[in-house]
């Protein structure tokens, strides 16, 4: 999905909390604050259990923040001068950065698989695999996120979209189209249907299914007349005629 389309995704409270923490620490794109999900101190029988949950959220959130900091790290090859070393907080190549990023996300996901931070890390690990061109692994990773988070949850739904993109990257267009078709049928889902339809249409074009692509673009125009994608959809329909 295009960057401008991603901005229109509906977000749950967890995703919003991550975004609000973005500017709290220099260099971090997102950072989960200590005590995620614990707005007040709970004093009750079994308080130790709640303390344990809060501590887990703290640690998992800090680990995720470290991974997100790597994602924002610049690519800066070391100087060729004798004795020069890699500058701290930078990576010599995109590949080196992605390797470090993947390892960091996977560490959070493995250590805290059921926590909000762990689920978020699992999603980002899958996205990193896709960015590295490891499409089949990305598909499996995205599907695992959907299973763990729940198909109707924010990350579960977003992971289905990610799986569709990874399937396209792997050249499995029919599977990608099926996934996007299913997502487009979810009227009350976490993703805007008009945006999903645009992705479906583009996937159909890549698969050489121009008639299906035209039908998807037409749905955007007919069913979502106020959509930000209407003008683009009309242009695409005209180009396909």
Image: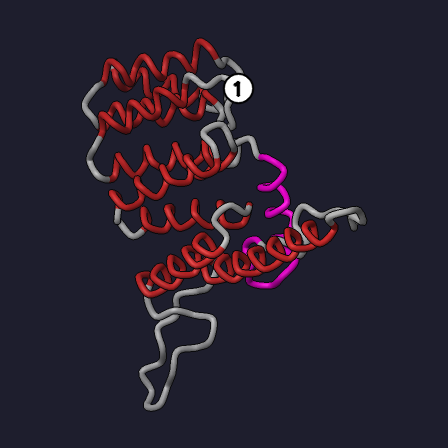
Query: Furthest-bottom residue in view?
Result: 82
Picture quadrant of residue 116 = top right
The furthest residue to the right: 43
The range drawn in magenta is 12-30
Residue 85: x percent and y percent? 38, 83
Give the residue pinned by disc 1.
188
Residue most toward the front? Answer: 45
Q: Is residue 141 magenta?
A: no
For residue 134, side relative to residue 73 (left or right): left
Magenta stretch holds residue 25: yes
| Near-viewer residue (147 or 231) | 147
Q: How many marks?
A: 1
Observer-nearest residue: 145 or 90? 145
Q: Is residue 62 above or below residue 116?
A: below
Please state which of residues 222 and 178 is positioned toward the viewer in this rendering: 178
Place residue 170 in its image quadrant.
top left
Identified at 60% across, 47% down, the residue is 19
* Residue drawn 65% across the image and 50% down it: 36
> Residue 241 appears at what percent x and percent y?
25, 13
């Amino acid at each position: 999905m295009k960057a401008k389309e991603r901005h229109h995704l509906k977000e749950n409270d967890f995703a919003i909390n991550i975004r609000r923490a973005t500017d709290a620490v220099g260099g971090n794109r997102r950072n989960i604050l200590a005590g995620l999900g614990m707005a007040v101190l709970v004093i009750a029988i079994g308080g130790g259990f709640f303390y344990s949950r809060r501590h887990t959220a703290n640690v998992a959130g800090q680990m995720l923040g470290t991974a997100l900091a790597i994602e924002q790290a610049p690519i800066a090859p070391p100087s060729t001068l004798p004795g020069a070393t890699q500058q701290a907080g930078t990576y010599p190549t995109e590949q080196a950065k992605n390797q470090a990023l993947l390892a960091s996300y996977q560490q959070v996901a493995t250590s805290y698989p059921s926590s909000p931070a762990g689920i978020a890390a699992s999603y980002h690990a899958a996205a990193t695999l896709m960015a590295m061109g490891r499409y089949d692994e990305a598909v499996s990773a995205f599907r695992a996120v959907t299973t763990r988070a729940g198909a109707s949850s924010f990350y579960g739904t977003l992971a289905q979209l990610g799986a569709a993109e990874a399937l396209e990257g792997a050249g499995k267009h029919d599977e990608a189209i099926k996934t996007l078709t299913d997502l487009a049928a979810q009227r009350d889902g976490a993703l805007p249907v008009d945006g999903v339809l645009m992705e479906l249409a583009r996937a159909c074009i890549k698969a050489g299914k121009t008639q299906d692509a035209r039908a998807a673009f037409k749905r955007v125009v007919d069913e979502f007349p106020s959509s930000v994608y209407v003008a683009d959809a009309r242009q695409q329909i005209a180009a396909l005629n």
